[in-house]
Amino acid sequence: MEPNYEFRFDENGVPVAITSAFGKQLPEELPLVKMTQINEKVSEAAAKFVEESKKANIRLRKALPSEGTEKVYAHAFLFYHLHLHQEETGEKVTFVDPGRISEGWKTDTVNGQEILTSSEEARANHKALATKYDAYEGSLRIDDMNRAFLVMACENFVLHEFSKVGSRQRIMCTPATLWEYVQEEAPFVQDEWEISILPTLVQDGWVLYTGEDGSVQMLPYGSGVPGYDAELGVDHPAWARDPNLPWP
């Protein structure tokens, strides 16, 4: 599960509120300030709840027989008490088996062969595409000012598209589309940039992936982008940049 935030932007293209998150469409938009406050309070409360639940679960498991007829009876007796609790209070107690909650985060096996998670598949797909299109070599040098122009133009395209569609998953960004935008918007363009755009962006932390229509897409690494590691929770700096900044 990923946040998958969708935003409302002001006239300057700056996100000011969210309209949906975690696959849920909100009844009305939620200001970012309020969202931050909620995140802080709920994160703290959830951490305490999980810690207390872990301790209670340990105590409960120690009280339950581990095998045979005694185990069968003990579990039936436990659920009877939980049923009484629900009837009295209306509160439902749910037990979750050990393991990951999100199917997208677990690694499973079939016939002894490990199945890749969606994130692992995306990273493997990135590597395969980068190899196929020679994206590991031929980037513009880091100390080359042309590189800054090229990267900034590509970031601007993505951020402007983001402001239009409101969701990173909806952005359509192919290398060809990026090159067209660079030619139109960058203050200085060289023809040889066309073959350098892919390796330069890959070196800069962009992710290659296959779109639903089979096309090669690419975006800066971050939440909502294939291969994102939710446990690290790191976004490419491009996502926080203002696309309306003047050219250097």
Image (cartoon, helix red, strand yellow):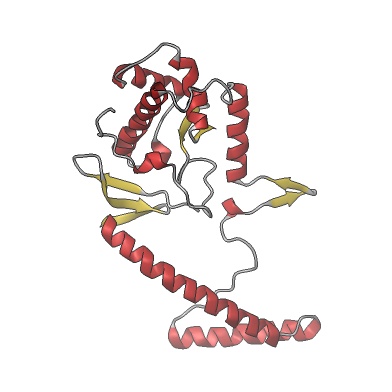
In the rendered view, tell whether residue 189 sits above or below residue 79: above
Q: Residue at x 31, y 21 (%)?
A: 186
Say how many tags the image has: 0
x and y, in percent, of residue 22 in the image = 42, 54
In the rendered view, tell whether residue 39 sits above or below residue 49: above
Q: Is residue 198 left or right of residue 37?
A: right
Picture quarter with the C terminus: top left
Between 206 and 97, the one lying in front of the other is: 206
x and y, in percent, of residue 120 in the image = 62, 43
Residue 94, picture quadrant? bottom right
Residue 219, picture quadrant? top left
Between 106 and 231, the one lying in front of the other is: 231
Q: Residue at x 44, y 16 (%)?
A: 193
Task: Inspect this view and state whether residue 212 appears.
Answer: no
x and y, in percent, of residue 37 in the image = 31, 65
Task: Inspect this view and state whether residue 87 appears.
Answer: yes
Q: Residue at x 62, y 47 (%)?
A: 117
Q: Is residue 196 left or right of residue 34?
A: right
In the rendered view, tell whether residue 187 sits above or below residue 161: above
Outermost residue, left side = 11
Q: Residue at x 61, y 22 (%)?
A: 132
Q: Is residue 40 left or right of residue 199?
A: left
